[in-house]
Amino acid sequence: MDSIIINGGRTLSGEVTVSGSKNSALPIMAATLLSSGVNRIYGMPDLSDINTMKRLIEHLGAECSVSDGLVINTENIRCCEAPYELVKTMRASFLLLGPLVARFGRARVSLPGGCAIGLRPVDIHIKAMESMGVEFNIDHGYVNASCSRLKGAHILFDLPTVGGTENVMIAACLAKGITTIENAAREPEIVDLAFALKKMGAGIKGEGTDTVIVEGVKELKPLTFTVMPDRIEAGTLMVAGGIAGGEICIKNCPVHCMGSTIEKLRETGLEIEVEEDNVLIKRKGRLKSVEITTNPYPGFPTDMQAQIMALLTLAEGVSIIRETIFENRFIHVAELDRMGAKIKVERDSAVVVGVNQLKGASVMATDLRASASLILAGLAANGKTKVSRVYHLDRGYDSLEKKLQSLGADVCRKRN
């Protein structure tokens, strides 16, 4: 397994460009199955999760190629089964359920495997689609779904669910009648998905609010679309500028949907200047402690919790981070403590006592965002840090080590 080696202590400078959003690209790739024809998606990040989704839709019979953007030809879909061997590596694979049932009237999708950061039940997807006329049975770890044609329905989620909102919204585009999704998730990636579906001819309104209304149509046309920049990568790069010091410019930054992240980073004492989609990050003096509670959008994103924790290990005073989304999302704490951090977990909260210096150590990534957190800590640590199991990193960051290298960091990938 690959590892990332960081020799800490270098300040950063220069410009870096944010890649396309993984959490936007994956549901949009799934949505291309709604139509028959050649789809072109631009701005795609080079990630293992993207490659997994590509292999899945190729398994269904689609033809994929990379030429400037990602080209997906969905004319010859011959299979409606998403096998466990592929689904187990990425829970977003369950997003194939909606488009397959909507277009072909059937789907057989493996139940996803476990997730290190907590439970992500798919029963909410199933319950919502049952109200749209889908019949389900679970057999040998597979969800079998069938329906002659989906019908519009009123769906009320108990809690906002990103995957559930996306799956229902995609499926409802070919349903007969109107589907209303209440307590819908409001994430920017859902808005981006809605924009893509509208370009295919879907009737959607209310995206970005807690009530999304979809008026079904008989057929959709193929898609040509550019995915939005990745707000979590952008936030991670902002933290890199803050934890290492110096002055960096982050380009192609989706600042319009990063209000909570930018606000909290400013509270730590970072100077952040915004000009259109460019962000300039500077740090002067020691960082300040803050209190953070993760919440669904537009609150502070859980996907930025581990990264800002790395930053706060060096802040003056005591910071409190409360995690409300995933029950196991503090498993990176023990690894940060190995680097000299002082963090105590109390149920759903982490108490971070700032220290003057982190120390390089051999640490192990436990999930996607934890891997980024440890690399960020390594940038500021005294000595060498080795982060192992960085296959997690490759699921959601497009060449992060190369981007940090371009800013002057002493970081490299060691292939084992």
Image (cartoon, rainbow, N blue to C red):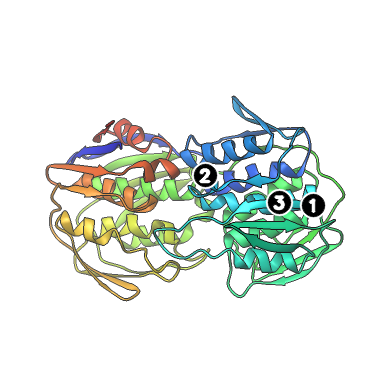
Query: To which residue does mark 1 refer?
Result: 105
Query: To which residue does mark 3 refer?
Result: 107
Query: To which residue does mark 2 refer?
Result: 85
Q: Position of residue 285 (x, y in %)?
A: 20, 54
* x 67%, y 53%: residue: 97
Give the SS element for disc 3: strand
The quarter in which the N terminus is drawn is top left
C-beta proximity under 8 Å, tags 3 and 2? no
* x 85%, y 52%: residue: 217
Marks 1 and 2, how far apart at CA = 23 Å
Q: Nearer the viewer, residue 308 or 95?
A: 95
Q: Position of residue 75 (x, y in %)?
A: 77, 33
- The extreme front residue here reads 140
Q: Amino acid at mark 2?
A: Glu
C-beta proximity under 8 Å, tags 3 and 1? no
Q: Position of residue 240 (x, y in %)?
A: 31, 46
Residue 361 horizontal side relative to residue 213, left or right: left
* x 71%, y 63%: residue: 136
Give the SS element for disc 1: loop
Q: Residues within 10 Å of mark 1 (few under 14, many from 20)?
A: some
